[in-house]
Image (tube, coloured by chain):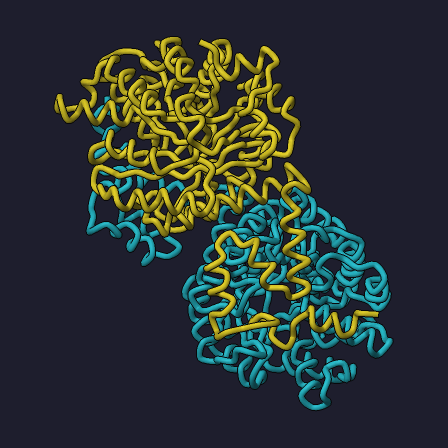
Chain colours: A yellow, B cyan
Amino acid sequence: MTTLMKIARQGTVTEEMREIARQEQLPPEKIRDRIARGRIIIVRNQRRAERIKLKAVGEGLTTKVNVNIGTSTTVVNVKMEIEKAKVALKYGTDTIMDLSTGGDLDTIRCTLLKICDVPFGTVPIYQAFIDTAKKKRAGVYMSVDDIFNTIEKHLKDGVDFMTIHAGITLELVKRMRKHRRIAGIVSRGGAILAAWMLYNEEENPLYKDFDYLLELFAEYDATISLGDALRPGSIHDSHDYYHIAELLNVARLVRRAWEKGVQIMVEGPGHVPLNEIAWDVQLEKRLCNGAPYYVLGPLPTDIAMGYDHIASAIGAAIAAMHGADLICYVTPSEHLSLPTPEQVKEGLIAAKIAAHVADIVKLGWRASRADYEVSIARARLRWGDVFKYALDRDRVIKIYTQHGARSGACDMCGELCVYKILEKYLTP
Amino acid sequence: MTTLMKIARQGTVTEEMREIARQEQLPPEKIRDRIARGRIIIVRNQRRAERIKLKAVGEGLTTKVNVNIGTSTTVVNVKMEIEKAKVALKYGTDTIMDLSTGGDLDTIRCTLLKICDVPFGTVPIYQAFIDTAKKKRAGVYMSVDDIFNTIEKHLKDGVDFMTIHAGITLELVKRMRKHRRIAGIVSRGGAILAAWMLYNEEENPLYKDFDYLLELFAEYDATISLGDALRPGSIHDSHDYYHIAELLNVARLVRRAWEKGVQIMVEGPGHVPLNEIAWDVQLEKRLCNGAPYYVLGPLPTDIAMGYDHIASAIGAAIAAMHGADLICYVTPSEHLSLPTPEQVKEGLIAAKIAAHVADIVKLGWRASRADYEVSIARARLRWGDVFKYALDRDRVIKIYTQHGARSGACDMCGELCVYKILEKYLTP
């Protein structure tokens, strides 16, 4: 089977690559060359490529943001999840992942897939585990076939990318039984696989049968996102033995995917102190030969519950400035509850601010032109032009008028508006 | 007149220094030595020292946060400002500044001073300008005496620290007439003084008569905060000629304050791209010989209106990690409107998260112990212990229960709770 990566290696520039080149204001040949080397991925399933807005992730591109939605085992409200998808699309997410674990998972996935005209991801191990638990009383009874059949089902449905926790191994999990960490395993996929491996005394099938997995993904030319099952769930676990050992496994798997022409990215932490974030990104890029890096947070503190979107924006901005390519949003409900649509919006906007702040550094004028335009408009008190660049126009206008209808200077400065003073006295 | 700085230089450890040492878990001698060298300041007016919670700012101490409150010329609601002060104190601000520009400024200041049992700051140039405008039709008619009399009035009232824009000079303002920047002067004090200097063709009195100013502050042993009148108001103005030229002036003034035994800190930007924030702090510390640095933001983008508290938290965390000592909060209403009490809370919590994230790096276990405790409690599903560390307990519990009353695993993971899975299968 041919894949986009193989085509790029043959030197061909496809229409998809041209579309990305237009979006990113880069020459199509540059896109092609980086796809060939695995440094850029176009995140789509061959089956859905014509039905979605194409998005690329990787070196030299704008930083992208992802929104997670989906039911949980205790809160199954498909209408609310549809609303979240719509909110995410309205406020400009680049990709959406359905992490549903409650209700009729097949129906929910297909419903959301239809709404989402951006790359759509899943974590199929959830469904394999949950479906097994329904049939056989416990998820750990799932067979290797159960796992791969679920993955294939998602591929057939057109899912563009999937988190695959192939880097966690039996050896690492056994070691963890003896040598604990503060927060253990906080990845749900990681915990499921750890339980499965220990219960069955068997190696992780996603690791052992990675070649088979690659065949499946090559067939649909979809993208693998290598999950970080052992990511730190506390800043005190950051970059410990487990974290780095899994990253080494991941580095080898990236090479194998490239050999088979399968597009792949690497998922990153997690909870990481602020001073470790820059080199965390550099380490991933070094070990994984520049493979795109998809970060969750990082969260530079464990105590920001209720405001984890802010903690996450701090970590994500630094990570992206140093080269992280895709930011997974975190909502104010992280660590506490399934988010509401409003919390999805809050989380997404925080992630978009982090991405833009980083892009100003990574891309220069391509990103910072917006800041220039806003500053010029602000200094001339042209509020309409300022609002044009707002990430959330309704909110901005609501705040601007919160003490009564306005025009001219804002209610912060009023008569003491610096721009009015300057206009009067600084104009020669 | 003797001052705390002079006493420290004589080798004496005062009760105030001991109190700070207890708060900061450092030896009193270390506090004394750093006060002697200007690297730590205890922010209080001699007249109010016994009526407030003492707070120190500087090298090796926890990062502090400041909340600005106060009326504007268009929104004068003293009851709301009192509420903001109470909200700020409830959520743990370290200092409060009254930036009122509307209504009866003397009464408002004294009212707020009574409520605030933390160090209290003002920007007296606002009042000098506004009072003059009321009496003489335009603020630029204010006399040098008007300025210094206002400062002395604030000192007498017990104001602990004041922003003094002494670094902006006639030469710089004249130059700006010819060589513009994107956002001009965005400091209100800076714009007032620029207008005054140009209109009267006279040097900045705060610069010219800095020795007299030092005498006043020494008499009350209050703290000067050297305002950055020419701070960048757009990331495109960051670290330009004006920004650095003012910083050089400020560096000289710091030395002169130290010679007179007056405690002083330096205010910083403003709008600064993310990659310039680390060295911005290093430059201040280098040029100003380690004087405490009080940063507004920095905001690493100009387009985050409505969410500037998040952009600011990103910049402040980096700044504080690299040595900034006091963070001025920014609210979601920045650039748009006078904040509401709710927005004061949002801004303060964002700043506190930034401070904590930085303190984890700066102070190690002294700060990160909270993260350890939260992570341990979280992994054991001891929610009560988790909530104890919340910056906003009510909000956290509200989110935790937003889909119905809860106990045990949260609604994000439900049955698929990693800690429940791990307990079952990972326990040897």
Q: Is residue A359 left or right of residue A254?
A: right
Give the tally of numbered discs. 0
Identity of the residue furthest to the bottom in this view: B135
Q: Is residue B121 visible?
A: no
For residue B13, what is the image quadrant?
bottom right
Q: Residue at x 47, y 51 (%)?
A: B353
Q: Is residue A5 visible?
A: yes
Q: Position of residue B2 (x, y in %)?
A: 70, 72
For residue A366, what is the image quadrant?
top right
Q: Residue at x 25, y 51 (%)?
A: B401
Quarter of the image with the N terminus of chain B is: bottom right
Q: Is residue A340 above or below residue B157?
A: above
Q: Is residue B67 left or right of residue A331?
A: right
For residue B152, what is the image quadrant?
bottom right
Q: Is residue A97 above or below residue B307?
A: above
- Which is more toward the observer, A388 or A124? A388
- Which is more toward the observer, B97 or A347? A347
- Which is more toward the observer, B354 or B182? B182
Q: Position of residue B363 (x, y in %)?
A: 53, 45
Q: Is residue A112 above or below residue B307?
A: above
Q: Residue at x 62, y 19 (%)?
A: A33
Q: Position of residue B365 (x, y in %)?
A: 47, 42
Q: Is residue A335 left or right of residue B257?
A: left
Q: Position of residue B264 (x, y in %)?
A: 68, 63
Q: Is residue B79 left or right of residue B380?
A: right
Q: Residue at x 29, y 54 (%)?
A: B397
Quarter of the image with the C terminus of chain B is: top left
